[in-house]
């Protein structure tokens, strides 16, 4: 065993090396969205030895989150997802966790990203927020990865990592690609699914927007979150 490596992360260091573990310990990752995708990403980053995590989400835990979200536990029902994820991270690592309970918008993006951020994970759903985050990262040379549509899918083995230019059959990716092209951003690493979305057998309407809510399961968001974390760790380690 390399005595410079914490016992907590020795199994990861066996694959990445002690030097990489030291890089992770000194790195700060900002994760936007602590839902089904973001929550699993946050936990994986913490378990990989990332030393500083900034979690951004303004939503609270509801019963409908129980089927897929790390933040969704009975003890945190009705509480902020950021609070739940901070407590969860504290159970598995010594990472320094900061949170922001805000809705990311183009007009608040400058204050939404900590100045010492080393990597950004975009696990939010709103197109305008994603674009603002991606543009900010591009302008400030901060590496970023985004997740596109995972709703209405069941097969985690179809989750892939690639460039947004490669993604087919995803309305979110199509819209994002079109809007980013207007800003001359032609490439973006993304996690996406090759699976064709299924038509929900039960219709549930979002009370705030009157739009149908996509179906979701325990498998696909988790796979996407782990893929996001894997990419972030490898970039931070120079892999």
Image (cartoon, rainbow, N blue to C red):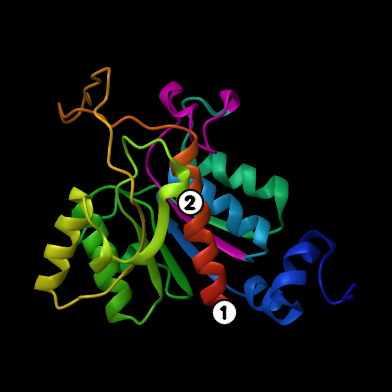
Mark 2 or mark 1, which is nearer the start of the sequence? 2
Q: CA distance from mark 1 to mark 2?
A: 19 Å
Q: Nearer the viewer, residue 238 or 70?
A: 238
Q: Nearer the viewer, residue 187 or 92?
A: 187
User: Does the magenta run of residues contain 126?
Assistant: no
How many marks are shown on the rendered structure?
Answer: 2
Q: Residue at the spot x=58%, y=47% of the render?
A: 86
Percent x, y for residue 227?
Answer: 49, 57
Q: Residue at the spot x=21%, y=50% of the render?
A: 169
Disc number for residue 36: none
Disc 2 residue crowd, few under 14, some 14–19, many 20+, Cα 10 Å: many
* Left or right: residue 29 compared with residue 178: right
Q: Secondary structure at mark 2?
A: helix
What residue would you read off at disc 1? 239
Q: Residue at the spot x=56%, y=73% of the render?
A: 234
Percent x, y for residue 136?
Answer: 28, 72
* Left or right: residue 131 compared with residue 7: left
Q: Secondary structure at mark 1?
A: loop
Residue 170 appearing in the image: yes
Percent x, y for residue 77?
Answer: 51, 25
- What quarter of the picture does the C terminus occupy? bottom right
Percent x, y for residue 39?
Answer: 50, 46
What is the span of residues highlighted in magenta in the rendered image? 52-75
What residue would you read off at disc 2? 225
Residue 117 appearing in the image: no
* Left or right: residue 8 compared with residue 224: right
Vertical order, 122 against 219 (above or below) = below
């Amino acid at each position: 065993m390399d005595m410079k490596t914490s016992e907590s992360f020795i199994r990861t260091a066996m694959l990445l090396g002690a030097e990489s573990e030291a890089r992770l310990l000194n790195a700060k990752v900002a994760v936007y969205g602590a839902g089904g995708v973001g929550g699993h990403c946050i936990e994986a980053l913490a378990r990989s030895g990332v030393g500083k995590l900034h979690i951004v989400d303004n939503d609270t835990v509801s019963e409908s989150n129980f089927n897929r979200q790390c933040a969704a536990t009975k003890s945190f029902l009705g509480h902020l997802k950021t609070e739940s994820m901070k407590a969860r991270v504290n159970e598995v690592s010594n990472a320094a966790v900061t949170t922001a309970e805000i809705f990311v918008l183009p007009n608040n993006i400058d204050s939404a990203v900590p100045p010492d951020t080393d990597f950004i994970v975009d696990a939010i759903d709103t197109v305008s927020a994603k674009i603002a985050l991606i543009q900010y990262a591009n302008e400030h040379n901060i590496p970023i990865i985004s997740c596109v549509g995972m709703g209405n899918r069941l097969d985690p083995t179809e989750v892939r990592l690639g460039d947004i230019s490669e993604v087919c059959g995803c309305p979110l990716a199509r819209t994002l690609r079109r809007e980013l092209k207007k800003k001359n951003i032609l490439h973006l690493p993304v996690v996406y699914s090759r699976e064709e979305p299924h038509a929900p057998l039960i219709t549930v309407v979002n009370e705030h927007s009157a739009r149908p809510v996509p179906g979701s399961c325990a498998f696909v968001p988790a796979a996407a979150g782990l893929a996001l974390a894997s990419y972030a760790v490898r970039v931070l380690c120079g892999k």
